[in-house]
Image: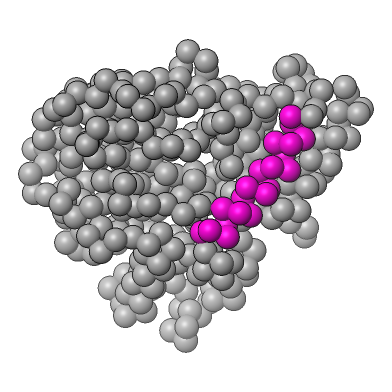
Amino acid sequence: MTRVYNFSAGPAVLPEDVLKAAAEEMMDYAGTGMSVMEMSHRSKAFESILNDAEKDLRDLLEIPDNYKVLFLQGGASQQFAAVPMNLFRNKKAAYIITGNWAKKAFEEAQLFGEAVSVASSKDKTFSYIPDCSDLPIPEDCDYVYICENNTIYGTKFWELPNTKGHDLVADLSSCILSEPVDVSKYGLIFAGVQKNIGPAGVVIVIIREDLIKDDVLPCTPTMLKYKTQADAGSLYNTPPCYGIYICGKVFKWLKSMGGLKEMKKINEEKAAILYDFLDSSKLFKGTVEKKDRSLMNVTFVTGSDELDAKFVKEAQEQGLVNLKGHRSVGGMRASIYNAMPREGVEKLVAFMDKFEKENG
């Protein structure tokens, strides 16, 4: 069977080398005589998988020693509640609204205290990143929150906001490991892995140790306390073992590719192929201001709903799948995460060129 080029925003494409290695180990992992799916999370074999995954992630992101790495369940959306539950002291936080996921996090935080919108790009359908150099951040707020890469709208913070001394909390779900990151600039990073790392079901939290406290909101469930998870080394209950195992394999694949500096170079080259075509096209039009374009999620339209639908259908027939834009905005979206090969982007652009000549 021929593999398609999968442009899905998540769950998304995984490296073929990782899938092949996992397939080979499906029935017998490292001589244990069983699949990782079957083994105890308390076993020596899984302990090694978890420890290796954390070590490789720390190496890739150069995570400082005073940060904990947690492999949790519940996806990024559960962190919308966990963050205020754990970090609220004054019960106030500043949110920068640059898309659906930041908006959802903002609304969730309002259940637990005062969430203040200090900037938004809603006025232009989230097609840009607002100026965050001098925001009206309340002095007594507990943190400043961003969704760093906006999967639906295709925008990216290329410069972090001036938080005026407050801790920065960032959802990095759709851009984590696509480039080097200075973790020390953040109080907390979280990322659902199903976009750029592994299968759905795992969320990674990277949190500075001084933010892990017993002093959380009284309503915080035991499972959602970062201290519970940190003290137990992500093993308070049965974690998503197989998902973590695949994440670990992706970390090793990234190392073999040369690490995050090399991945950023590859991703910039891939994105340039698609953006350069969009900038010269008479039919297709990018939907994001150039300075704020994401390397991971490229959004575009033809200007006609009928043509958009025709393009998505005919692209699928050519093995270019999951190009339909998010249901809330329509159009098209090509998610070109780390595991999308350059050849996939080139094939997409060649098809777009052909489609334009036939329909322009």
User: Which part of the image, by quadrant, shows the C terminus?
Assistant: top right
Image coordinates of residue 31 in percent, x first then y, are 47, 86
Which residue occupies 30% across, 40% down? Answer: 169
Q: Residue furthest front?
A: 133
Main secondary-structure element of the magenta-colored stretch: helix
Q: Which of 29 and 12 is in front in this view?
A: 12
Q: Which of 303 and 236 is in front in this view?
A: 303
**Location of residue 81 by image quarter:** top left
Magenta span = 260-279
| Left or right for 165, reference 203 | left
Which residue occupies 65% across, 38% down? Answer: 334
Q: Which of 303 and 232 is in front in this view?
A: 303
Q: Does the magenta stretch include residue 262?
A: yes
Which residue occupies 76% across, 26% down? Answer: 284
Q: Is residue 230 above or below residue 7?
A: below
| Left or right for 85, reference 283 | left
Residue 43 visible to the viewer: yes
Q: Residue furthest top?
A: 123
**Location of residue 133 by image quarter:** top left
Image coordinates of residue 325 in percent, x first then y, are 62, 30
**Location of residue 120 by image quarter:** top left
Residue 40 visible to the viewer: no
Image coordinates of residue 339 in percent, x first then y, are 61, 56
